[in-house]
């Protein structure tokens, strides 16, 4: 592991807005005290809780928290070196409606109680074209989201991937979820309050996709109180492109 990563990990241990837990910690009293108590123990308010899954550098978590101070945001990822950037930004800014949780997303149910989460954002995840159970919009993960979300809570997917968008749309329709908004070209869609948060922020990788002439897809749906799910079985053409590295400099403005 590089010295830079080790330095970031050490610094994150000092941040008041970062919680880091491994499988070995699941039975600890600290972890058990978190589920169901985020509002009272950390945020000190009764505002809605919004998760960003696979938050990476926390660009969306911090950006949404700045835009919506009456909501509480928690960025979740297993990659601590990436999370450091957003966590440090929020810590230095003294933002009280932001937290970061460094865990595997499959462990979600250990850290949140039933009906504790109001919304989930999934922004530009790996489409996981080869293995459906790793796909963050699969029924495998929907079952986990059902366990922590309020009835009719909203899940948002923002993606460049035609594969993931097509799959997710099929999954939503197969399970009769109520669609809040659905567009295959976010920035050509008619402006409205329903897509304002999705349009107002662009991550590093989103700007990269736009520079390459790719369209950004956005779909949001309600998650009712139910557990019986149907996995769609459809043939989808795989994406034919890959991302540039983090050092790529975008020509797209905000």
Image (cartoon, helix red, strand yellow):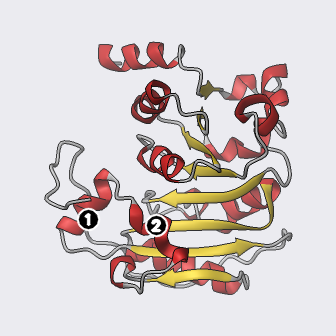
Badge 1 element: helix
Q: Are marks 1 and 2 in contact (CB under 8 Å)?
A: no
Q: Position of residue 162 (x, y in %)?
A: 39, 77
- Mark 2 Cα within 10 Å, few/some/many (few <14, many 20+)? many
Q: Nearer the viewer, residue 196 or 115?
A: 196
Asked whether residue 2 is in view, the answer is no
Pick whichever, 105 or 72, lies toward us. 72
Marks 1 and 2, the one that precedes in the sequence: 2
Which residue does the numbered mark 1 point to in the structure image? Answer: 209
Quadrant containing the C terminus is bottom left
Please tell me how crowded label 1 is: few (under 14), some (14-19), or many (20+) other residues with Cα within 10 Å: many
Q: Which mark is residue 82?
A: none
Q: Is residue 238 above or below residue 121?
A: below
Q: CA distance from mark 1 to mark 2?
A: 15 Å
Q: Is residue 221 above or below residue 7?
A: below
Going by the image, does 156 lie left or right of 60?
right
Residue designated by label 2: 198
Considering depth in this image, is 98 or 111 the residue closer to the camera? Answer: 98
Residue 217 horizontal/vertical position (percent): 41, 75
Percent position of residue 52, x then y: 56, 51
Residue 45 picture quarter: top right
Image quarter in which the N terminus is found: top left
């Amino acid at each position: 592991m590089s010295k830079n990563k080790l330095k970031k990990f050490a610094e994150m241990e000092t941040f008041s807005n970062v919680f880091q837990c491994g499988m070995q910690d699941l039975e600890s009293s600290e972890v058990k005290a978190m589920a169901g108590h985020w509002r009272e123990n950390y945020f000190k308010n009764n505002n809605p809780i919004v998760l960003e899954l696979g938050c990476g550098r926390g660009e969306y978590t911090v950006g949404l928290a700045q835009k919506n101070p009456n909501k509480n945001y928690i960025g979740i990822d297993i990659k601590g070196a990436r999370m450091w950037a957003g966590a440090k930004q929020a810590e230095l800014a003294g933002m009280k409606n932001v937290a970061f949780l460094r865990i595997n997303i499959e462990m979600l149910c250990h850290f949140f109680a039933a009906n504790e989460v109001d919304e989930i954002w999934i922004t530009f995840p790996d489409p996981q074209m080869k293995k459906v159970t790793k796909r963050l919009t699969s029924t495998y993960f929907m079952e986990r989201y059902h366990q922590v979300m309020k009835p009719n809570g909203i899940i948002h997917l923002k993606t460049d991937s035609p594969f993931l968008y097509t799959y997710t749309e099929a999954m939503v329709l197969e399970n009769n979820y109520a669609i809040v908004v659905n567009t295959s070209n976010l920035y050509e869609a008619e402006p409205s309050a329903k897509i304002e948060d999705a349009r107002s922020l662009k991550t590093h990788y989103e700007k990269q996709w736009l520079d390459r002439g790719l369209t950004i897809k956005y779909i949001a749906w309600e998650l009712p109180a139910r557990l019986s799910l149907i996995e769609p079985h459809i043939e989808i053409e795989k994406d034919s492109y890959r991302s540039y590295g983090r050092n790529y400099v975008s020509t797209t403005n905000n």
